[in-house]
Amino acid sequence: MIVLGLLLLLLSGLAPARAETLITSLSNHRVLINSNYTGTQIAVFGAIERDAQTVARATVYDVVVTVRGPRQFLTVREKERLGPVWINQEQQKFPSVPAYISVMTSRPIEEITSDQLRQRQKVGLEAIISANDFTYGRNGADKPFREALHRLKAQEGLYLEDERGVTFLTSDIFRAGIPLPATAPPGNYDVDVTLFADTVILARTTTDFELVKTGFEEQIGVVARDWSLFYGLATAVIAIFFGWLANVIFRRD
Amino acid sequence: MPVSVLLILGMGAAVGFISGLFGIGGGFLMTPLLIFLGIPPAVAVATQSAQIVASSTTSVLGALRRNALDHKLGAILVAGGFVGSALGVWFFAAARRAGQLDLVIVVSYVTLFTIVGSLMLKESIREFWHRRKGGTVRLRRKAGEHAPYLGWPLRMRFYRSKLYVSVIPILGLSLFIGFAGALLGIGGGFIVVPALLYVFRVPTTVVVGTSQFQIVCTTLVALILHAVTNQAVDMVLAILLIVGGVFGAQFGARMGRHLRAELFRFLLALLLLAVGLRFGLELVLQPEEPFSISVQEVRS
């Protein structure tokens, strides 16, 4: 028993090539957004644990927190001039892209790691959007559409990158605030935390939270989607009722 | 949708006022306003149909009480209108899937409004001119003078309207109105009323009640179909529009009694042309952001 225990201890000491482990926690695993509000924030806390054998590093740690929302099938269309008028012509389909992406980093992402690693590991908003699995490649014709998607989503606050989004409270404890606008759709959000030092990935953890919308307008939205006939009839009844009411109130004869 | 509640209420009241003033539905003004405000055309069109149902319910109830309604003619109009409405909603959904709905709506508005607006303008200026010269204009109606298509087969007698005409042109008219109404979020009163008055020579006493009867029925169908197929009806927006519109219309109607008829038509024509022009600009000017996103499907 003792020998086995010693062996295990020895193995556990030897096995991880990376000496750091990452422990992360979310402030909530269920986020409620009232559709009337301006949105909310969720906090990610993390601690970096170094085992006794590892010597302290000369350089500081870097952390990248990537949050991906539920997937959507999107079509981006471009208006082009046809004779005197502007109409939608070219289009690019994005079969399965996150409705929401935010990338929080402890310093500018170019300083954290190399270009190749960013592209390969899809670190940073640019890398995620230009990745091959984001949409179909069309020999460069897809590029303006990727950029347009990025721009339009960024305007809505749904795609964002903050190079000061992660703050280190001590040298190995950090915190990131993830802004969630009111337009963020309900569903499952994956949180990926990656630890870097000297441009290499040391550790990675994933967790997730669920975004739930509350409030009157959201409930109406659910009824409109899932009970559309009932919703249409109810709207019709309301309209007729108001019409009748006006007739009664303003009767002139 | 980040649009101010008070703004919508105010707009509803203002458009209601104008619609009461001119005795028309107001859909043709409200839908473009909502679109200019940034509400997606699909939602604007579908939701506005709820407001049209409300305002035409009020007028139909009034017409029923005054017995100013030709039931038989109304029923024929509704039959054609239903088919038109269903086709309109289907076309709406198809255009939306193809990503060309906005274009279809804008082009239709430009065409319809420019034609109807300039016809009305011409008519009102002509009338104005005659009045200045001292003469009174009256619709000349010679005995037996009718457009030839009114004598097509399937003739039917409408006692209240003092008509004996083929149902084919009536069905055709209502089919078109139903289609345009569902596609554009308008009741179509500003087309049906002149058509019934001048083409079919329906007496003025029953024309408004009958056309409103048709509008309330077809728009009701369009509203429910829009909710089911396109899920573009916004109940909250609809209620705001209805409340604003109902009260505005009453004040407008009161003001309207002091306005002269040809001035009326002149102003209405200008209004139509202005809306048509505004849409035309939208089509011709270079857009600030040529790209747009549409959500095909949510995968969760």
Image (cartoon, grey):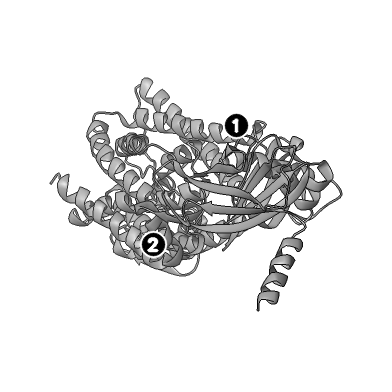
Q: Residue at x 54, y 32 (%)?
A: B278
**In terms of image quadrants, where is residue B82?**
bottom left
Instruction: Mark 1 vs mark 2: tell me if same chain.
Output: no
The secondary structure type at the circle numbered 2 is helix
On screen, residue B288 above or below A232:
above
Asked if residue A113 lies left or right of residue B46, the reply is right
Q: Residue at x 19, y 53 (%)?
A: B66
Amino acid of disc 1: Leu
Quadrant including the N terminus of chain A: bottom right
Residue B210 placed where, x, y %?
32, 55
Amino acid of disc 2: Gly
Asked if residue A170 lies left or right of residue B129, the reply is right
Asked if residue A194 lies left or right of residue A29, the reply is right
Q: CA distance from mark 1 to mark 2?
A: 34 Å
Residue B2 placed where, x, y %?
44, 40
On screen, residue B131 above or below B152:
above
Of residues A168 and B218, the one drawn nearer to the viewer in this rendering: A168
Q: Chain of mark 1?
A: B
Of residues A107 and B272, the one drawn nearer to the viewer in this rendering: A107
The secondary structure type at the circle numbered 1 is helix
Q: Is residue B187 visible?
A: no
**Residue density around tag 2, few if under 14, some if 14–19, many if 20 or more, within 10 Å:** many
Residue A238 placed where, x, y %?
29, 56
Residue A73 placed where, x, y %?
64, 58
Q: Is residue A144 visible?
A: yes
Of residues A21 and B117, the one drawn nearer to the viewer in this rendering: A21
Q: Residue furthest right?
A: A139
Residue named by callout 2 = A232
Q: Residue at x 55, y 62 (%)?
A: B90
Q: Chain of mark 2?
A: A
Residue named by callout 1 = B281
**Residue density around tag 1, few if under 14, some if 14–19, many if 20 or more, within 10 Å:** some
